[in-house]
Image (cartoon, rainbow, N blue to C red):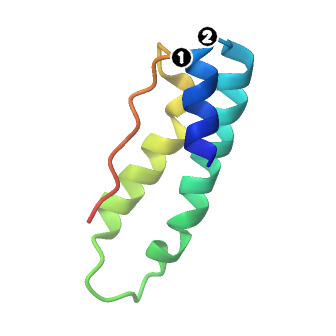
Amino acid sequence: MLRKRYDTAVAEENAEDAADAARDYRNALLEACDNMMVPDRPGVNVEAWMAYRQALRDVPEQEGFPINIVWPEKPE
């Protein structure tokens, strides 16, 4: 739903709505991976998740923000 809101704002070339939607979507992605940062979780590449989370936090700093965002890929 949040990603669709972002995609709609981009399609309408509404930079203000796109920025708000991008931040909301980014925040949801960050929240969704909070549980991957538990230090004793077996089989988790903590460094990859840390890098992913940093890339998400850096999304607003991308040159094309908010219309041209390269979303980071979630680690497996």
| Frontmost residue, 12 versus 63 | 12
Residue 28 position (above or below residue 37): above
The amino acid pointed to by label 2 is Glu
Q: Quadrant of residue 34?
A: bottom right
Instruction: Residue at the far top: name it.
Output: 13
Residue depicted at 52% across the width and 76% down the height = 35
Q: Secondary structure at mark 1?
A: loop
Residue depicted at 48% across the width and 21% down the height = 62
Q: Position of residue 52 (x, y in %)?
A: 39, 51
Horizontal side of residue 18 vs 41, given as left or right: right
Q: How many marks?
A: 2
Q: Secondary structure at mark 2?
A: loop
> Do the residues bearing badges 2 and 1 touch, measured as CB atoms within 8 Å?
yes
Residue depicted at 65% across the width and 24% down the height = 18
Q: Which mark is residue 29?
A: none
- Residue named by callout 1: 67
Q: Earlier in the sequence, mark 2 or mark 1?
A: 2
Give the class, few, some or many, for how many residues have Cα within 10 Å of label 1's Cα (few <14, many ≥20): many
- Residue named by callout 2: 13
Residue 43 position (above or below residue 3): below
Q: Is residue 22 visible?
A: no
The amino acid pointed to by label 1 is Ile
